[in-house]
Amino acid sequence: MSGKKKLFRFKEMETFSNVLEPVLSDIMDEEDTGVFKDHPMKGKWKSEFFKNENPLVLELGCGKGEYSVGMGRKFPNKNFLGIDIKGARIWRGAKTAIEEGLNNIGFLRSRIDFITSFFVEGEVDEIWITFPDPQKEGRRERKRLTSPMFIDRYRQILKKGGIVHLKTDSDDLYEYTMEQVEERGYGLIQETNDLYGTLVDQLDADTQEIMNIKTHYEGIFSAKGFKIKYIKFTIH
């Protein structure tokens, strides 16, 4: 994408009512102590951003927001919030939601590291992690979105019994996450290392429809013959 096109998208996105782009000073201590502070929207997503009390579902590392938009179309009585640091990607999902009048879809431009600055305990009903960077083994494992560091943050914001979903093409991330589920006693609900080959027909109709939503990267991976893995679990 050209620099001019990116700049245009960034500028246009500033006018989008369904996008929150916080500045670092909103969540970082002014003295740069490394301590995060609460963003003004924390605890107010339903009442002030979506202006309803419907369940709140997050899509982490949402990219272009294919899942947020797709699920928002399917479930008008739920709120969907895609989170990603890449503004040029968020622009696509946010613009689609505006064009289609989907008021239950929003986007937050932020790193996932800061997630506890934006949500209070129990504010989030469900989390989707769709095709995240699997991160290499070794020192980068802690950056995986299903690592203990991130799961502990999700635990702080998820309601009791709230569900985490992972879809990935990565064998390493799938196996790593299954190890975490078993070692840490998370509540495993469903899992498969070949979603469309073994499990999809066993899912209820609504979930099957969700699974048919495909991100940009999932389309690429599937076309190359990669098997899609899926894990559904709780962490409380």
Image: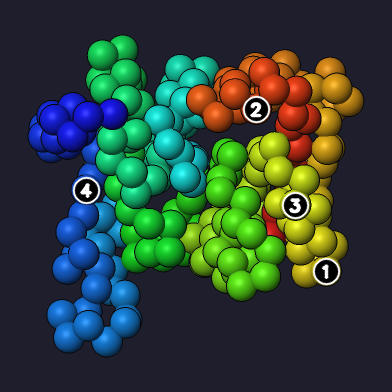
Q: Mark 1, residues whose alpha carbon is within 10 Å: few (<14), some, or many (≥20)?
A: few
Find disc 2 in the rendering and name its residue: 221
State the image coordinates of residue 71 (x, y, percent, origin top left).
51, 25
Residue drawn 60% across and 21% down?
Answer: 219
Disc 1 to disc 2, C-alpha distance: 29 Å
- Between discs 2 and 4, the one toward the N terminus: 4
Residue, x 74% and y 38% (percent of image)? 230
Q: Is residue 23 above or below residue 109?
A: below
Instruction: Name the amino acid, label 2.
Output: Phe
- What is the distance, in whole Å, between disc 3 and disc 1 at their CAs? 16 Å
Q: Is residue 45 left or right of residue 230?
A: left
The answer to whether any part of residue 50 appears in the image is no
Q: Which of the numbered marks, if any, corresponds to residue 172?
A: 3
Residue that extends furthest to the front in the rendered view of this protein: 2
Q: Earlier in the sequence, mark 3 or mark 1?
A: 3
Image quadrant where residue 41 sits = bottom left
The residue pinned by badge 1 equals: 183
Pointer 4: what residue?
A: 21
